[in-house]
Image (tube, helix red, strand yellow):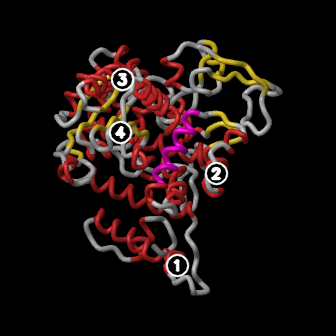
Amino acid sequence: MDQYSWLVRKKAELSAALGKPVTWDDFARHIDIEPRALKNYRLPESSSNHRTLSKTIRGLIELRVEIQSAASQSTSPKQHDGQLSSHPSGGKEANAPLSFNGDQLLLFRLAGLLVRHCAFTLEADTVVSGISNFAGSNLGLLGEERRTLSELSRLALRSGRPDVFAEIHQVVYLATTPCGQWLDFMDINSLGLGDLPLIDPQTMTPTEACSALASNCKDASTLYEEALFREFLGILEEFPRKKSHMIYTKVREFVIRHPMVTPIDLNKLSFAPKVANFIHDHFYEPYCSDHVGSQTIKICNHCGSEVKSGPYGLACSLRACAESQSESYNETDVKDGLRRASLGIQRFWINPGFDEVRLFDALKEAGVDQLELFPERDMTDISVGGYEIGIDLKSHGSPEVLGHALKDSIKGLSGFKSKIICIPDRLVRRNEGYLQTVKEISGRRDILVMSVSQTKHHLLELRAGGGC
């Protein structure tokens, strides 16, 4: 799609969100671009006055159009009645609207704000700033984000609490602590957020709960992931369909199993130079020790991540591993060219992938046949027998948040005959009512909600009966 056609499409999306036609000048005002500059962006490439949209400007246009869409939804009659429409995905996913109260909708917006700022801070090398955002920059607060913080300030003051929302840096810091310590004036218990932070204090990336909450705000639902993966998926489109799926699975599995790599490790991938170079440049970054002058590194024996000192002593830097495995590491010299996975990759691939590949390995070792990891470029986490069984592993700290997310959509899992939502055993042990809470809130009868142990037992029973 050429640049002009792309702009026409975005203008049409804005018109749909506003419920009325918009002129090009209206469009320019909504996306904070001078009308004269927008005219140059619309000119044919052959014109001497044509200007090419940078990735940054494209991203900001998409973000502002999505924000307007979300704002339009939040002011619709159904929204005032506490209704939030489910995402349109067609087929079996066209469920009835979800019900959320005003506090929950405000929490979704707060989570979206945190996800966006984590994305730009980690992936675009910007800093968290309280200045107003302007066109062409990732720095600062959008108007919608400033309104979100203002509403939180007003609610806090009305509840007799101190206003901690006037400073974005303070909000980001507080988000690393349990929600119950600073958002107790809001309805957080219905979402099971009391003991959960929205930002991982060690990696400063959004937690599973934060990402799930942000997915209810269209402006933030895909921004974080697209910042890193859009170009990679575009590269895969250059290959035949079957091969592109194979490359995706192989790359993702490699990255999950190798949080730390050397050039020798990367050379083992044997991919086309364009793919290999992208992995090297964007999925990994040069390793830099937290300790000046240190020539050694502690590597976790369970997952291959770095073991670091924390509030409670040494612990694996991969949260899922630290929560489920006992401390075990080897201390080795830092090798030349050592690289570690970027924080974005850790957040979206490696941390959830720790449980996914462990389940895959366990099922394979148990003799379950026709297993595939991340089929159809992550249609689900694990498939068994083609489209017979799909397994989607979820490691949300809050079963309430997960239940609401599943009520809205089960995404690619809907394409499988038998659908399993699989929860790590550690989360079920921590909360005995986890599985039942997910089942009740989601209200879905087309899925099985099981722990990892139950999933293994279920599949082995099917295998014994000739089912897989």
Residue assigned mark 3: 452
Looking at the picture, which amino acid does disc 1 mark? Answer: Arg
Task: Please say if 305 is above or below 262.
Answer: above
**Cα–Cα gap, marks 2 and 1:** 41 Å
Measuring from the top left, give residue 175's x and y in whole percent.
48, 30
Residue assigned mark 4: 383
* 256 is within the stretch colored magenta: yes
In the image, 128 versus 312, the foreground residue is: 312
Q: Is residue 440 visible?
A: yes
Measuring from the top left, give residue 350's x and y in whole percent.
53, 34
Query: Main structural element of the magenta stretch: helix, strand or loop?
Result: helix
For the point 43% across and 39% down, the residue is: 373
**Cα–Cα gap, marks 2 and 4:** 26 Å
Helix, strand, or loop for circle 3?
helix
Measuring from the top left, give residue 282's x and y in whole percent.
62, 49
For the point 45% across and 71% down, the residue is: 28
Measuring from the top left, give residue 99's x and y in whole percent.
20, 39
Mark closer to the observer (3, 1):
3
Looking at the picture, which amino acid does disc 4 mark? Answer: Ser
Residue assigned mark 1: 36
Mark 1 or mark 4, which is nearer the start of the sequence?
Answer: 1
In the picture, the disc for residue 276 is 2
